[in-house]
Every structure is written in structure tokens, then in C-alpha cells.
Image (spheres, rainbow, N blue to C red):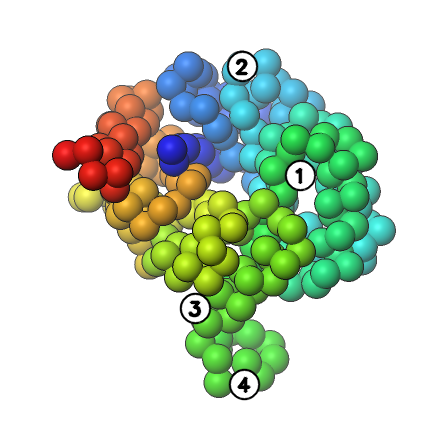
Amino acid sequence: MSRLVVALDAPNRQTALEMARPLQGVVPWVKVGLELFTAEGPDLVGRLKKLGFQVFLDLKFFDIPNTVRGAVRSAGHAGADMCNIHVLGGERMAEAALAGRDESAPEMLLFGVTLLTSMTETDLPLDSGGAQASEIALRLAVSAKAYYLDGVVCSGLEVEGIKAATSDGLLCLTPGIRPDGAERADQRRVVTPAQAVQSGSDFLVVGRPITGSEHPDLAAKAIQGEMIRAAQKRRGES
Ligand code: C5P
């Protein structure tokens, strides 16, 4: 069953809580990113947990193994239910991240960022040897599985390839979701909630189509309805 994660892209605690409150009891997961975490720190994670949310701490750690181990350990102590690292940090960094997770919150999900979906092969500061962005992302996802990460952050357009290449061995979390008719804003390669579920995505990250809506609870419910119908269709129930 795919789950909805609402991105609380806010500059401070007050705005984040205003975004979160209408979603209490409606949406299971929220995402705290770099801007909000840098402004407010780990206390906010605890506050969101008290409101009943599961929290994805989207800080994309990438540093020497010992530092990443400590950062993931701290994410676990803060109460995060999911956090992430860059797969490009390699096997030793991933091993250190897993060790940090085991030291604080063994049940916390640890995801890998493959190639940021904002980047193409031409944005890489190194020669990609002719490989396209999607191919690089796929190779990094295969590495993420070899490193025993729980899942990867990827474009909805990459889920089927990643699931096939890893024998369904990785969870996929996909941002860049837009219901039909919603503003794309700065997102480029978007998929609808139904398309993301049909391709096998496990977590759908949605921000502005919900947080920017006049009725965020209704917007979230509409997306979850679309997700349920797509899951039934995928299972051949209708
Ligand atoms: O408002 P919107 O639905 O575009 O928000 C998407 C969220 O997912 C934002 O928090 C954005 O930073 C994040 N994200 C993304 N693309 C990625 C990784 C994260 O849009 N590749």
C-alpha cells in the first residue's frame, strides 16, 4: 500500500505547524527538509510526532563515514521514522549510516538519494562517460540495494526500472507528484498520484498541491482516494 508524505516546506515552526494541523488524522507522514530543520532543529520532529505524524527527515547526509554515522544516530534520537543519505557517498558511508541507525532507532527507515531529479548528466561536474541521468540513477539504486539501504528517492518515471533491476528489493519514494490540473510550479518531470501508484511507488511526496490549497485536508483526501483507486486497479480489483 503506497503512503502519502506531505512536504512541510516552511521557513519556521509556526508556519510548519499551521500546515500540519489540518492534516492531523488525515495524512500519515510529513517531511521535514533542510530549511525547516536548520531553522528549528530536532524539537520540531518531536512536536510533529506528538501530533501523530510519522516524520521523514529529508537531510540527505553526505560526509565522511564517522560524521554520517553520528548524524543518522542523531536523527534516530530526534524521533525520525525515516532519513536519507546520498548513495554517491559509497559503501563505507552507507555502512556507517546503518550503524548509526542501529545505535539509536533500528526501526527507522534509511533511504538513499540516487541522482537528484533536478540534475541531468550535463549538470554533473564529472564526465559521466556518456551515461544518461536515468542510467546513472538506476546504477546508484542497484548500489543502494547492495549496501542494504531500505529504499531510494527517485522520479516516478524511474520506479518501474528500479523495481525490475533490484527484484523489488528496494522501496521507492517519489517526489514530483502533481494531480491532473494542478500547477507544476518548478517541477518538470511530474507524474500523477495514480501513475506513481501504478508504477509501484511506495511513498508519494506531495507539497504545494496540498499545503498551498485552501482546504489542505480535502486536497490530501482527494489524492489518497486517487491512490486507493490506483492500487485497486493495480491489484486487478476493478
Ligand atoms: O511542492 P512540491 O510537491 O513540489 O514538493 C516536493 C518536495 O519534494 C519538496 O520538499 C522538494 O524539495 C522535494 N524533492 C523534490 N525532488 C527531489 C527530491 C526532493 O521535489 N528529487
Q: For residue 159, which quarter of the picture? A: bottom left
| Image point (55%, 62%), residue name | 142
69 to the left or right of 195: right
Tell me where residue 181 appears, x and y as whole percent: 18, 43
Q: Which residue is mark 2?
A: 51
> Counting residues from the N terminus, which is met first, the one under dot 2 or under dot 4?
2
Residue 53, visible in the rendered structure: yes
The Cα atoms of the two marked residues, 2 and 3, are separated by 38 Å
Q: Is residue 114 above or below residue 40?
A: below
> Counting residues from the N terminus, which is met first, the one under dot 4 or under dot 3?
4
The Cα atoms of the two marked residues, 2 and 1, are separated by 21 Å
Residue 129 disc label: 4
The type of residue carrying mark 3 is: Ser
Task: Give yes or no for contact between labels 2 and 4 (Cβ–Cβ under 8 Å).
Answer: no
The type of residue carrying mark 1 is: Thr
Q: Secondary structure at mark 2?
A: loop
Tell me where residue 180 appears, x and y as whole percent: 19, 44
Task: Give yes or no for contact between labels 4 and 1 (Cβ–Cβ under 8 Å).
Answer: no
> Counting residues from the N terminus, which is met first, the one under dot 2 or under dot 1?
1
Q: Which residue is mark 3?
A: 134
Q: How many marks?
A: 4
Kindly report which numbered mark, 2 or 4, lies closer to the viewer in this rendering. 4
